[in-house]
Image (cartoon, helix red, strand yellow):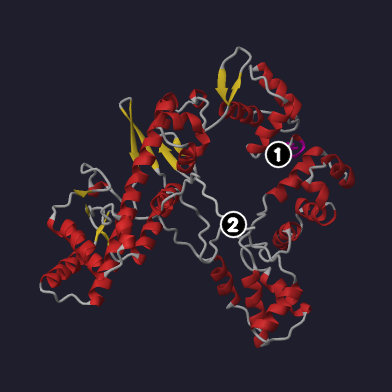
Amino acid sequence: MLRQTLSQKMLQKLSPQQIQLMKLLQIPTATLEERIKEELETNPALEVGDTYQEVFDVDGGNEKEESNDNSEDGVDYELDDYLTQYLEDDPASYKTRDDSYGEEEEDRSMPVPVEVSFHDNLMRQLGMVIFEKEEDEIIAKQIIGSIDEDGYLRREPSAIVDDLMFSQSIEVGKDDVNRLLKIIQKFDPQGIGARDLRECLMIQLEDRLQRDPKDRNKKLALEILKNNFDEFIKKHYPKLKKTYSLSEFELKEVIEEILKLNPKPASGLEMEGKPNVQYIIPDFIITNKDGELELTLNSKNAPDLKISEHFAEMLLGYKENIKTNKASKTEKEAILFIKQKIDSAKWFIDAIRQRQETLTKTMYSILRFQYEYFLTGDERRLRPMILKDIADMTGLDISTVSRVANSKFLQTEFGTKRLKDFFSESIQTQDGQEVSTLEVKNILNEIISRENKKKPHSDEKLKELLHQRGYNIARRTVAKYRELLNVPVARLRKTL
């Protein structure tokens, strides 16, 4: 049975402006310029300039009346009131940065690497090969296009055959693909076009043996790669010494021949459309001026924004038409469109300004919290700090602080740091002091770097060494920190 009921409930919804601000908070300085360019392309009311003319609340707080009054007179009244406010009042101008910031001090250029494309390098070498048939060149180009960013061909010959059939309408066999792949594998850099790591290393060794065929160590290294590759990568050195009747010194020389090879032959070249070098643009800069720390928000590559003067002139022209009763229905529709775009531009400029204020406020609180570290650079001075600590200091929500810390970088005189790396939990030492887990990780890394590589410490031994320094943590915690530091287990750290 159907029935009507009356109930009350509270809902919390985010406005489009709030959503826009949260998205802007997440993006780093390196990509902020692209976001601004995107907005400039989609909103003609937004322009690059030194100042921004403030646009007043165009709705006038009468949303209900506007929704209930769809008459032409209502529209005329709303627009006339809007035009009076926007054109006759003297709007305050404000900038997205301080007046004292010198324009001449700012470099708006984004570093762009200029390098030879990896595939272009292979195609130039391919141009020097003389093919018996035209389709061989087509197959070779397809193979080169299938090589990934590490320099490996991880596609099966059958898949390349299918690609040629669908894209070029050429029917070839797997033998043709393998034959031409052998030619490409002789290109520079050595090891290009290999199907796996083992083949990549073998190609490089075979090439070196051709230039020095009497080198015993290279011959043994090639034998190990052919017949005992698993033992080599798992560092089962006793088994290799027994198999090849080598002393520890002799095996070390053979292993060094393999370690000289490049496991990623394309690592030194740029992929087409994908720079191999990723430049870090710091979002914040901390400088030490005679013992005083100064925080700067990096606003490079982010242009100042303002409302288009052309749009203001259009509004003025419409107002003149209203006075002479010459405004047409088309003009009214156009002015409503302009109003919408001006509002959107104002919201975006306000969001950029709020982003700057929020970022500065959050980073200033982090600076105060970790003042001793930023003053000295001593990582032992880093205090345990969680998102809630900064949220309490700033009055911001924890999620807002998290968005600020994510993907942001800080430039100091001690190097460029990832902002989220300053956040850490605390552990208690044996004497009752609370220290940051970052300090424990640094000490763990120091112990591992100083260990005897012939007999590396196990996780249990690392736990005992940390206990001796006053850090009472479990073995599984040691293993967790070691993995976070990208340090392999003891067996894989062992060297001859």
Q: Position of residue 432 (x, y in %)?
A: 59, 13
Whichever of labels 2 and 1 marks the residue nearer the N terminus, that label is: 2
Q: Position of residue 162 (x, y in %)?
A: 72, 79
In the image, what residue occupies the spot 34% across and 61% down? 67
In the image, what residue occupies the spot 76% across and 47% down? 254
Q: Position of residue 79 (x, y in %)?
A: 22, 64
The C terminus sits in image quarter: top right
In the image, what residue occupies the spot 75% across and 59% down? 202
- In magenta segment, residue 399: no
Amino acid type assigned to the residue bearing label 2 in the image? Ser
Q: Which mark is residue 488?
A: 1
Give the magenta range: 491-496
User: Element at badge 2?
Assistant: loop
Work out whether residue 77 can be spotted: yes
Amino acid type assigned to the residue bearing label 1 in the image? Pro
Counting every numbered tag in the picture gives 2
**313 relative to 434, above or below:** below
47 vs 114, nearest the viewer: 47
118 vs 253, nearest the viewer: 118
71 vs 405, nearest the viewer: 71
Q: Quadrant of residue 443?
A: top right
The furthest residue to the top: 431
Q: Is residue 326 left or right of residue 279?
A: left
Q: CA distance from mark 2 to mark 1?
A: 22 Å
**Residue receiving disc 2:** 267
